[in-house]
Amino acid sequence: MAARKGAATIGLTKTLALELGGEGIRFNSILPAWTETERVYELMKHRASLSGGTLEDEINKQAAISPMGRMGTPEEFANAAVFLVSPAASYITGVMLTVDGGMYKGTM
């Protein structure tokens, strides 16, 4: 299911970038990994209740998967978004930008 959602995001991003680029409208997607948000903490609490561990245990398990050893922050996600809508990214469209601390192991 996740692969289909990913393919749908890629297809939508590319299609809209192609269709709207001529009008000067850029269309990109940001693909985040685990980010420190209230929702993620709720998910980690649920995991902890299922495993009998603590919230901190679950956060540490998730962080250990990342090459950077931590989850991202909302500010880091926002920085990527700000860049993509800024004039500095004026020739970038149809991009799926992973903001994941190096977790994605694919080539594209």
Image: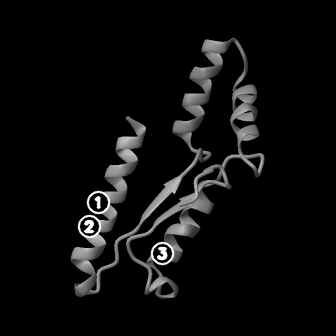
Q: Which mark is residue 54?
A: none
Q: Residues within 10 Å of mark 3 (few under 14, many from 20)?
A: many
Q: Amino acid at mark 1?
A: Leu
Q: Is there a contact, CB below 8 Å, between mark 3 and mark 2?
A: no
Residue 31 position in % (x across, y down): 49, 55
Separation of residues labelled 2 and 1 (CA atoms): 5 Å
Depth check, front residue: 63 or 54 = 63
Task: Choose mark 3 or mark 2, whichever is in front.
Answer: 2
Q: From the viewer's perspective, is residue 72 above or below residue 64?
A: below
Mark 2 and mark 1 in contact? Answer it, CB < 8 Å: yes
On the image, numbered disc 3 is attached to which residue?
A: 84
Residue visible at 55% across and 29% down?
43
Q: Which of the two discs, 3 and 1, labels the residue nearer the N terminus?
A: 1
**Gap between marks 3 and 2, in whole Å?**
18 Å
Dot 2: what SS? helix
> Position of 88 compared to 25: left or right?
right
The residue identified by callout 2 is 15
Residue located beneath label 1 in the image: 12
Q: Secondary structure at mark 3?
A: helix
Query: Measured from the top left, where is residue 36 in percent x and y?
Result: 62, 45
